[in-house]
Image (tube, rainbow, N blue to C red):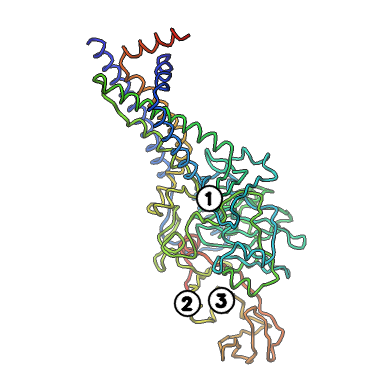
Amino acid sequence: MKNKIKRKQSDQKFKYRYLKAALIIFVIFVLFYSISQLQRKTPESGLARIPLEEMLEKRLEEFANNIVSGGPPKDGIPSIDEPKYVSVSEADKFLEENDVVFVVDYKNNVKIFPQKILVWHEIVNDDVDGEKIAVTYCPLTGSAIGFKGKFNSIETTFGTSGKLVNSNLVMYDRATESYWPQILGVAVTGSQKGRTLEQFPVIWTRWNKARGKYPNAVVLSRDTGFIRSYGRDPYGSYLTTNNYYDSGGAFFPVMAKDNRLEAKRIVVGVKINNSELAIVKSKIAENKIANLFIEEMPIVVIYDESLDTVRVYSRKLENRVLNFEINNGNIVDKETGSEWNVFGKSVNGVMKSKKLEPVNSFDVMWFAWVAFYPQTEIYN
Amino acid sequence: MATIFYVLREVLKERKAKIIGFVVALVYFIFYLYSIGNITIIETQELLSFKVLDNWQTKIFKQIAPFLWEPIALLNYNGLALLFSLPNILLALLLAILVFFNIAVAVYSYHISKICNVSTSFKGILGFLPSFFTGFACCVPTFLIALGPVLASFTVFFIKLRPILIPLSLTLMILSIVWGTRRIPNQFIKTFVRRAKNET
């Protein structure tokens, strides 16, 4: 009997210790979390317009302070550094008609990057005619952007840092280890802080459209040097609705919120110097063309139906500002009546063979664009 | 501490405890690999295939998240795939062994409770739960994707918590085994020790 009581007491004592240990662990984590939250500053409102240099200094600090861990370590999401390509007919075996793909038409090389592969790698480091380039995709912000792998006479490749800012991929360059948020394209830490990467256009479209338009293109192969379940998208699907890609908010904290549009609405982001414009993609698909100004620069936004994409060009050509309209299904400038194609090239009339200067733009979820550029204007 | 080994030795002699423990541990093993994405469905036209990475030696111990390593081979049967990563399999095995002992001890305790008046508890088994939250889909914990982005700051908090989930699971399950064996009455333990000594 005595033994039984003793055993019971010992049991209770052990149980008490067990609970105490669990409680201590819990309290430590609550404390850790509270401190980290106190240290975080997440301004919810936009910033007033300030000169570029001042803005850069201040904003870069803010971006750097708002970098959070995404979970995986550096290169935990591995970039593809030795991409292999297959033909369109070969790729047709593993791509569905409406799969999202990213088209890079650079130096007369057309390459197609399936989203179902990039969702697992986020960065493809490639070489085009001896020039280093990186095709980048952030699934959390729905942004695909091309960057040249050369800055300040340094040639480099990029990797994933495992960090995020405004839910957006933070890349690092392997030469200087500086951090580059993808949407910003500007280094926010390291020796290259303040430097901007040169971009090139990446077209967001669907496989059936890209295949039809570029039958001779090459397509990124699933032979990436890594084993992933490429048919499965861990975040959701662009083929269905009511998942991460089209509803709800961000997974990670953002520096600014704006309810002018729904968080996941797809906009085409355009940035020129200190001005930003978000063009609602569905609106331009409806209107087909828009003559706009950004930072007093006249631009034309053209909906390219063949790829379901938006192309942006400067309207300034040889000291003259052109205004475009759709006339009998053709793009025509009002000044000379010349006909233009979606690539910004005049195909008929007095302007024949002239080319408009392309303006960098990319598709992105509204919440992410406005988190980086709270003062952005909207074309809706 | 030595008594734990005598108890576990006895537990392993109990057929029912062993079978139930094994079945639960096997189910746990499969679910764990599924939760970290190493058992998955893939798009393929092949019925049966096996592929090993050419440079598997350089990737076998490459960590892709805390307590998650790079798969180096893929076994596919009609779209059901096992992404093979040695460290992930070893960790899953270790966790499954602890689940096995937890269940076996609990079943054994339950068996004893029928013979004499001993209270039984299975709460300690829940120690395996944290290990299910360790799967990572690129940037976000897998289970948070399933729940949806309810609270952005919670994701950040959870990511800070993430590295301790596996050690927490291991600690809780080991403590649970120790606790479970201590609930077995003294007279039984004395018999176990005597039996073990006679056998040796």
Residue B80: mark: 1
Both marks 3 and 2 on one chain? yes
Q: Tag 2, which chain?
A: A
Q: Identify the residue shown where x is 61% and y is 40%.
A: B62
Task: Tell whether B146 sits left or right of B52.
Answer: left
- Amino acid carrying mark 2 in the image: Lys
Tell me the CA gap for discs 3 and 2: 22 Å
Coordinates of residue A32 in the picture (x, y in percent):
41, 38
Mark 3 lies on residue: A296
Q: Is residue B185 visible?
A: yes
SS for dot 3:
loop
Coordinates of residue A372 in the picture (x, y in percent):
50, 60
Badge 2 crowding class, 10 Å Cα cut-off, few under 14, some 14 to 19, many 20 or more, is: some
Mark 2 lies on residue: A283
Both marks 1 and 2 on one chain? no
Task: Tell whether A161 sits left or right of B110.
Answer: right
CB atoms of marks 1 and 2 within 8 Å: no
Tell me the CA gap for discs 1 and 3: 57 Å
The total of numbered circles placed on residues is: 3
